[in-house]
Image (cartoon, helix red, strand yellow):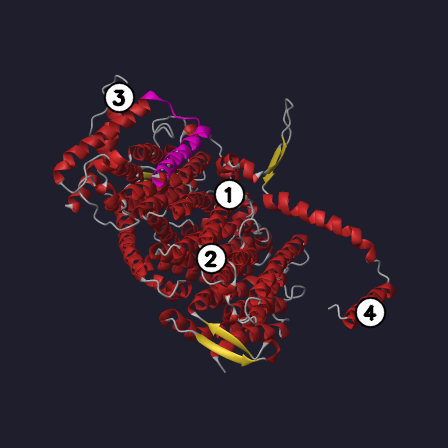
Amino acid sequence: MSFIALILSLALAPLLLSIINRSKAVIAGRRGAPLLQPYFNLTRLLQKGVVYSDVSSGLVQLSPVVNLAVLCCCVVLVPLGPIPAILHFSGDFILLAYLMGMGRFITMLGALDTGSSFEGMGASREAFFAALAEPAFFLTMAGLARITGAQSLNDILQTINSEHWLHATPSLLLIAVAFFLVFLAENARIPIDDPTTHLELTMIHEVMILDHSGPDLAMIEYGVALKIWLLAAIFAALFVPPGTNVLWLPLFLLLMVAIGMLVAMVESSMARLRLIRVPQLLISAGVFAGLALFLEFVQ
Amino acid sequence: MSSLFWLILLPFAGGFVALIDGRSRTRSALWALAGLTGALAVAARPVFIALASGRSSTATLPWAIIGEQVQLVLDPLSAFFLLPVVVLGLLFALYGSAYMRHYHAEYLHHGVHWFFYNLLATGMILVLLARNGLIFMISWEVMSLAPFFLVLFHDREKKSRHASWVYLVAGHLGGMVLLLFFLLLGSSGHGLDFSTFQPQLLTPGFRHLLFGLAFLGFGVKAGIFPVHVWLPEAHPAAPSHVSAYMSGVMIKMGIYGILRSIQLLGGPVLEWGILLVLAGVISGILAILFALAQHDLKRLLAYSSVENIGIILLGLGVGMIGISLQQPVVAIFGLAGGLLHILNHALFKGMLFLGAGVIQQQCATLELDKLGGLKKQLPTTAFCFLLGAAAICGLPPLNGFVSEFLIYCGAVHGQTIGIVSAAWPLLLSLAGMALIGGLATACFVKVGGIIFLGSPRSQHAVQASETTPAMYLPMLLLAAACLGLGLFAPFFIQLVHYPLSVLLPASTTMAPLADATTRLKDIMWITGVMLCLVLLLGLLRIILLRKRQVAIAPTWGCGYLHPHPRMQYTASSFARPVTLFFEAVLRPRVQRNVSEKLIPGTISYTSTTPDSVTRYGYTPLFVGVTRLLGILRWIQHGRVQLYILYIITTLFLLLMALAGGWI
């Protein structure tokens, strides 16, 4: 069962991105690209040749490979709604965070490998914002562990139920908000970063991959899809009924679509924040999670 | 004679012969290496026995001066700390023997250098074996004094002399506090033997005071914020293998001291655990911020050592909180993580310092903004350094992750138990570790990226070439160790089993350690899968790109046609978002010379970030003390006759006092 979930995640991940894009188009009054567009893009990129910078020293080739390998490993750790994760143990969310950290580390080095000041700029911003998002992520997880008494991602997400929501409404709401902010930051979405911006100076994630092409770019794009899928799966699992009843799977997938639409609504209704405002947003995510924990301590 | 005596004697003898034969660069290094090899050979058996079966080795020596006999004991805790002292000591010396060939024998005495290097090793071994306050303090002084001469290697440079003075003063102020600690503790029992201390007779308040003294005294050696100021001075001045030895191994003796003193004081209480956590969070965050703001590689690495000491303290603090609340899971995960991080940090920080030495000799500078693109010229060094950078950020599948994972687990478990008084420091350590980890990643991406990637920023960096095997083999070995300890963590965690049982109360169950092992096994599977996936995806890439066009073109410059290496992002610009955000703490000194005229001339911009604690704390303090003591300067006038008069007067007064029965 878990392996079906693995294949489902690997196959459906790009779809979430296209749901976001389609919803944004609809909100803006356009028709938008077909839902399968990310798949078309990936196959097209996989068929192309590559161009490397004459400055690069090999890390630019290594970085997409390692990044994708790391994100594929993350899929193993995240439950897909009612379907449990393939591997779970106490503290596995620490591994998840650090695996993603590894992906980020190698992506930043890949960006610096080209010697481009724009890519260096992107890496620098990514490094700083990730450093601020990290405590918020750990605090949300600690809060969930405190509320549910479980210590692995799988157990936390599969025990959380209406009982918890009734008893700890304010803290769970705060945690949900904090996690959503972390989700937006980790996936380089508005208001932290704008994936569709066209000016190199204002980008964060997109500018780091300027010099990637062909299959390398395909791996990076697929990795982006996997990451947003995984974090959305964690977020969605907060709201589905507990247990491992597979019949809840359609509901869970619907929730994923709803999260995609929510992201699209956020992106359509506001612009990217000024870069100096982003740290404040990320710190407030940490403060929300800390506040939730404080509420739990007081009870 | 017991092997423990040989363990002390051999490195000392090696160093002594090196001193006598010090004219020759090669022979003096070989003598020192021989002594250290002997120490390693002698230490292997007792260390193995202590770590694998928990049995201590003991040696006794009759010595009338301090009592009937001197006892030297190698228990599992000492053995755990001894492991890096002998293994890495030899490895760094091997690197050092090649590194030192760079310097002529005429005016830099190689024999003296190797004598003090081996003396440092001997001092550390003695510190770990000592079970008597007096012997401990003597060994501690030996260990503290030897680096003074090692740091002073380039004694014609003013910077070196300044650095070694700062080190000496800091070390001795710390030593003074420790002396007080042992004397007060000794007054509780009857003698300075560790076994005769009776901490249970002390009042809680007095025990707090004693722990405070030990924490301060050992903290100076460990480099805890704000008594860390000697590290960023001494490490850049010392030769690289000495920096590696000091930063990787010697500062851990401070941690050993803290652990031993907690044991001597009869086990931890909650407040001490909280103190360790607070000190850990403060050291970690502030030190990594200062590291980010530095331009000199070795200075940066020195600050990063302070940061890692912070992580170690966090782990030990979590463990101490666990012990005092009788939560074996929290205690064992925290302590195991803290202890393993000691070993891990010794490995990767040693490697990074050795890499810094290669860069220094090849490029004649450690200024980050003058380097760049070295991965092409120094492929082996670059591989090791980048691996070490990933390890120090705690990224899987390397060793740094294992220890940080264990500490996190301890803190997370603390959230699920009901005790609120313990929950907040554990929560603080959780959030603190996450922030430290994120900032460390920023810092080491900066270091690795700016030095090794991109294109060279100066002529020196263009002309660099890879070093000799004697210099990169130790680095490769350390890299292999970092990877091995990360991949096979479930086996290596057994190293801390018996050291843990020394620290834990006798009744504590060791079951959580087995739990940790199973968790690490799961992680081992995932990291194994990850490495396989890297290979598979790499293969896929190669297959896909076969027979396709692979073009080489200039980096995309956003339309700009004539890029220049100096236009690359620099280390300072990379760190700018962080340093700007934390400007209130870092207080960088900026000198800008930008003309406002219509036709601008040359413009310049320099920024340095000196240590805020030194700048606003110690410098005013010591200037004030000097000024105050200046009042007494009239006593010192240089006339010998009057000095003799002082002596006679003092003697006379003392005799009078004795005769009068006042003392």
Label 2, residues with CA under 10 Å away: few <14, some 14-19, many ≥20: many
Answer yes or no: are tags 3 and 4 on the same subunit.
no
Question: Which chain is disc 3 placed on?
Answer: A
Q: Quadrant of the C terminus of chain A?
A: top left
- Quadrant housing residue B136: bottom right
**Residue B101 appears in the rendering:** no
Label 2 element class: helix
Numbered mark located on residue A25 in the image: 3
Label 4 element class: helix
Q: Nearer the viewer, mark 1 or mark 3?
A: 1
**Residue B297 appears in the rendering:** yes
Q: Quadrant of the N terminus of chain A?
A: top left
- Quadrant housing residue B399: bottom left
Label 4 – label 2 distance at C-alpha: 59 Å
Label 3, residues with CA under 10 Å away: few <14, some 14-19, many ≥20: some
Q: Are marks 2 and 1 in contact (CB under 8 Å)?
A: no
Does A274 appear in magenta? yes
Label 1 element class: helix
Which amino acid is tagged 1?
A: Leu
Q: Which residue is mark 2?
A: B351
State which tag comes first along the sequence, 2 or 1.
Answer: 1
State which tag comes first along the sequence, 4 or 2.
Answer: 2
Q: Which residue is mark 4?
A: B652
Q: Are marks 1 and 3 in contact (CB under 8 Å)?
A: no
Which amino acid is tagged 3?
A: Ala
Q: Which residue is mark 1?
A: B289
Label 1, residues with CA under 10 Å away: few <14, some 14-19, many ≥20: many
For the record, the magenta segment spans A269-297
Position above or below: B13 against B217: below
Q: Where's residue B464, x and y in %? A: 52, 52
Q: Nearer the viewer, mark 3 or mark 4?
A: 4
- Furthest-top residue in this view: A29
